[in-house]
Image (tube, helix red, strand yellow):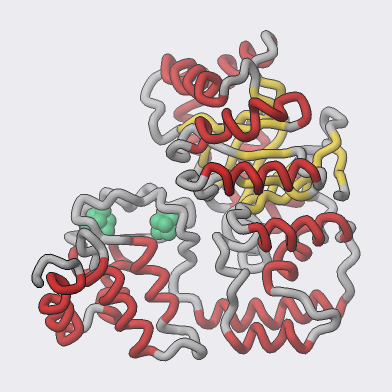
């Protein structure tokens, strides 16, 4: 494992961090093995949040209990839930209790989306509250995670002497979100930058065939995920790269990358291959959904991330269009306990402000519906549904 030094406090942080959000909590032993393997191989930064259902409690057992003094433990204040100043204590104390610890090493305001949004919490006194927690040792470093535009990011960075920040960054998002300009702005101020979504929610681990061909022509042979993680680690401004690793092979692959990839080591030819793959992927992506599910539940049960996954599937040359649309109807109309078609959307707007990717969900769902909701497939699904769900024998 290669470690990078936090420029603000000298902490040695593994350049691969474990994003725990998507751990398969129903299989506790599998989660335990993944965490044990990560620790044995030098990972020392673990990310969770109050907002991730069941995640903090799971980590209390498999991470905090056995390894508390060997790791940097993070969690986040759920800003979507904060309505008044008393909520800072309420959610922070809940996090400590769930995790079974008395301190958080890196604590973040979760998902700031604009300067005005941050300003609302600053007026409530969140910065003074955090300073008090730091003074008594309950928070060691205080920062924020960000999903908004570059301008807002830079204003938030300039508004306070943060200990660190976390941004979405990958080779598709150089000009979106905080972007390369935001990364460099934060680093120029000596701020440690943690990276989330280095593979855009897994989208860069499985790429369209033409992009895969580009990677396969490059030497040495690497998986698309490896290319994506290496690209982020190539930036010296990055302190650590969070990756959600739910399968042993994902973890093994990332550990290998993190044990050999030095900042600035990518060659011109490698960077050119990534640029070529990026162009191909962007030309085929209809909507930049990462599948985070922050927009759920929908009052009309639209399975928003699944709809977007299939909609993006319509642009992939390696997926038969009919097969893609049939799978959409099968998954959301026949096999799921509740139907989740895009056409169920009534444009209520409940999801509109919840998306970290700033997707105008109601508008995009309407477009997706035009492409995916075929009357004849839905008619066939209506007949098949009771049989497939075992309600008629
Ligand atoms: S706008 Fe549509 S997709 Fe969004 S919550 Fe309302 S019904 Fe669901
Ligand atoms: S639409 Fe936005 S909030 Fe919903 S899953 Fe996709 S990225 Fe997440």
Left or right: residue 372 compared with residue 44: left
Left or right: residue 279 compared with residue 123: right
The residue lying toward the viewer, choosing from 143 and 75, is 75
The residue lying toward the viewer, choosing from 167 and 336, is 336
Task: Answer above or below: position of 263 versus 371.
Answer: above
Task: Answer above or below: position of 58 versus 393.
Answer: above
Task: Answer above or below: position of 27 versus 393.
Answer: above
Q: Residue at x 58, y 34 (%)?
A: 59
The residue lying toward the viewer, choosing from 71 and 137, is 71
Q: Residue at x 61, y 69 (%)?
A: 204
Residue 57 visible (yes or no): yes
Left or right: residue 341 compared with residue 101: left
Q: Position of residue 222 (x, y in %)?
A: 77, 75
Q: Residue at x 61, y 58 (%)?
A: 247
Task: Answer above or below: position of 7 versus 146.
Answer: above
Res 281 quadrant in image: bottom right
Q: Residue at x 56, y 26 (%)?
A: 99
Q: Position of residue 383 (x, y in %)?
A: 11, 78
Outermost residue toward the top in this view: 136
Left or right: residue 378 compared with residue 44: left
* Quadrant assignment for the C terminus: bottom left
Q: Position of residue 388 (x, y in %)?
A: 20, 72
Q: Position of residue 240 (x, y in %)?
A: 75, 47
Ligand 1 appears in which quadrant? bottom left
């Amino acid at each position: 494992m290669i470690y990078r030094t936090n420029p603000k406090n000298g902490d040695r942080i593994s350049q691969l961090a474990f994003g725990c959000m998507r751990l398969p909590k129903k299989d506790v032993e599998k989660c335990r093995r993944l965490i044990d393997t990560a620790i044995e191989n030098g990972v020392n930064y673990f990310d969770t949040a109050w907002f991730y259902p069941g995640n903090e409690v799971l980590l209390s057992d498999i991470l905090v209990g056995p390894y508390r003094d060997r790791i940097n433990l993070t969690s986040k204040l759920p800003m979507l839930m904060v309505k008044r100043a008393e909520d800072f204590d309420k959610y922070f104390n809940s996090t400590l209790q769930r995790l079974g610890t008395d301190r958080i090493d890196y604590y973040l305001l979760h998902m700031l989306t604009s300067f005005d949004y941050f300003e609302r919490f600053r007026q409530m006194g969140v910065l003074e509250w955090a300073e008090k927690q730091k003074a008594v040792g309950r928070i060691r470093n205080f920062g924020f995670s960000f999903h908004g535009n570059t301008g807002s990011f830079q204003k938030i960075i300039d508004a306070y002497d943060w200990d660190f920040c976390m941004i979405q960054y990958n080779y598709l998002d150089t000009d979106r979100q905080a972007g390369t300009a935001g990364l460099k702005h934060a680093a120029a101020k000596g701020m440690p930058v943690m990276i989330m979504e280095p593979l855009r929610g897994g989208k860069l681990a499985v790429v369209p065939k033409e992009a895969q061909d580009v990677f396969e022509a490059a030497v040495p042979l690497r998986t698309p995920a490896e290319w994506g993680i290496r690209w982020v680690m190539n930036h010296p401004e990055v302190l650590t790269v969070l990756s959600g690793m739910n399968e042993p092979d994902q973890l093994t692959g990332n550990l290998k990358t993190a044990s050999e990839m030095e900042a600035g080591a990518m060659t011109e030819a490698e960077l050119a291959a990534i640029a070529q793959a990026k162009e191909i992927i962007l030309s085929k992506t209809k909507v930049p959904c990462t599948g985070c599910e922050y927009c759920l539940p929908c009052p009309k049960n639209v399975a928003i991330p699944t709809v977007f996954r299939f909609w993006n599937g319509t642009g992939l040359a390696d997926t038969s269009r009919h097969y893609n649309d049939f799978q959409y109807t099968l998954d959301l109309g026949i096999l799921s306990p509740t139907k989740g078609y895009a056409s169920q959307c009534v444009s209520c707007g409940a999801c509109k402000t919840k998306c970290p990717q700033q997707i105008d969900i109601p508008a995009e769902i309407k477009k997706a519906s035009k492409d995916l909701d075929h009357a004849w497939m839905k008619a066939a699904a209506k007949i098949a549904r009771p049989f497939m769900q075992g309600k008629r024998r």
